[in-house]
Image (spheres, helix red, strand yellow):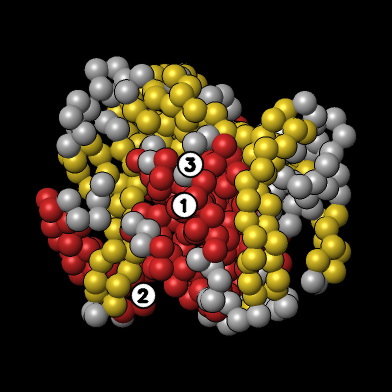
Amino acid sequence: MNKVAVIDCQVAGIAGDMLLSALVDAGADRKKAEDAIFACNGFLKGSRISKVSFEKVVTHGFTATQLQMDLKDGVHERRGSEMLRALAGTCDSLGLDQRARAFALDSLKSIISAEAAIHGEDFQSVHLHEASSIDTLADLAGCAAALQDLGLFDARVFATQVAVGGGTLKFSHGTVPNPADAVLRILQGKKFVIAGGPAGSELTTPTGAAMLATLAREGSVGYYPAMAPEKVGCGAGHKKFDGFANILRIVMGSAPLEGGLEKDTVCLVETNIDDASGELIGNVIERLTDAGAKDVTVIAGTAKKGRPVYLVRVVCDTALLDTVLALLFAESGTLGARVQRVERFKLPRAVVTVPVEINGSTFNVHVKVARDAQGGKIMGAKPEFEDIKIIAARCGMPAKRVAELVGAQVAQKTVAGDGIQ
């Protein structure tokens, strides 16, 4: 069996306090979550949390857990870099393991990066407004501690489509359409499906979106994966709505394995392209890859009447099928495509964050780890090349050399079991 979890945000969206409440409702140690929240005190000048509790509430006939806090925060704007230092200090004071710490920091970094892109500012200098309060730190640190306690960093985490609400929002820069730009930037390009409604109000917050994107790396799924449910947690938000309960649900359990292998269903899309240049084929591959296709293969062949032809074969998630077909028709000139839904068996895998040292600096690198189907032994660990490129740019080194250095450190940690669990 393989540990899995589903974050169900298709009705009421997701906010940081709702996720933390759902984790506690599902069995995370309440005391550890409260300690993580109180640990935020002392790291942000002018801010203090004086009371924390997780209370059982009933909303629209459903029982859920709700985070309640008394806090004082006299500062309404802080640099993102200040928030990042405060969160790092909080995590260090708690002694969180590397994966929990990286989860919290990566989530906050995605918020800061989104705000920097929106306002055209540098990552180090951009100011946060709504996300600058101590309750943002509380949500991030609390969820990191709860996820670690539940062992969910060892699980495959899925998400449903994300309800974002509707209408407009009023915040520090005036009135804007909902969903907020930060939510869209955070989820952009990450295979999440958003849906408006069922309320004309904000349902998904930047903090909630950031933690969802950091946890559920496979994006949204149309249906729950095959699983044996073991724990269910419901976290209630503070807004009240007509017609539905403002609840985020998390379901944890085990997925059956076929001979120890994971199984999912993907779309196999094929088309024949003739009268095409190598440059055009290269562009098709690039566009499909950027759109999120799992794999793109091009095979050169010979068609009827001796014409040279390219067979383009694309593997993608079902949710991405329309996008893949639209790109094939627009970019290749093909007039048709064959689509099959096929089962895919694969070794259990997960993306973990591993610290590496390059030129005296420490960087967090996302590593895809594949394990033996029966015993869980690590069969391979591959660093994400996007992280390699970022490190190379910051250190002024060739990407090839950085890949060698990172690969050697990851291989050493894999053998020693240091940082790769």
Q: Position of residue 207 (x, y in %)?
A: 62, 56
The dot on residue 239 is none
Q: Position of residue 262 (x, y in %)?
A: 33, 25
Asked whether 370 or 40 is in front, the reply is 40
First in sequence: mark 1 vs mark 2: 1
Q: CA distance from mark 1 to mark 2?
A: 39 Å
Mark 3 lies on a secondary structure that is loop
Q: Which residue is mark 3?
A: 28
Asked whether 412 or 271 is in front, the reply is 412
Q: Position of residue 358 (x, y in %)?
A: 24, 74
Mark 1 lies on a secondary structure that is helix
- Examine the rendering and report whether any part of residue 90 can be seen: yes
Q: Which residue is mark 1?
A: 32
Which residue is found at the position 57% from the left and 37% from the top? 25
Image quadrant holding the N terminus, namely: top left
Q: Which kind of residue does numbered mark 3 sit on?
A: Ala
Question: Which circle, 1 or 2, is nearer the viewer?
Answer: 1
Q: Which residue is mark 2?
A: 393
Image vertical order of residue 266 relative to residue 248, above or below: above
Which residue is found at the position 84% from the left and 39% from the top? 241
Mark 2 lies on a secondary structure that is helix
Question: Which circle, 2 or 3, is nearer the viewer?
Answer: 3
The residue carrying pointer 1 sits among few (fewer than 14), some (14 to 19) or many (20 or more) residues within 10 Å by Cα, namely some
Q: Which kind of residue does numbered mark 2 sit on?
A: Ala
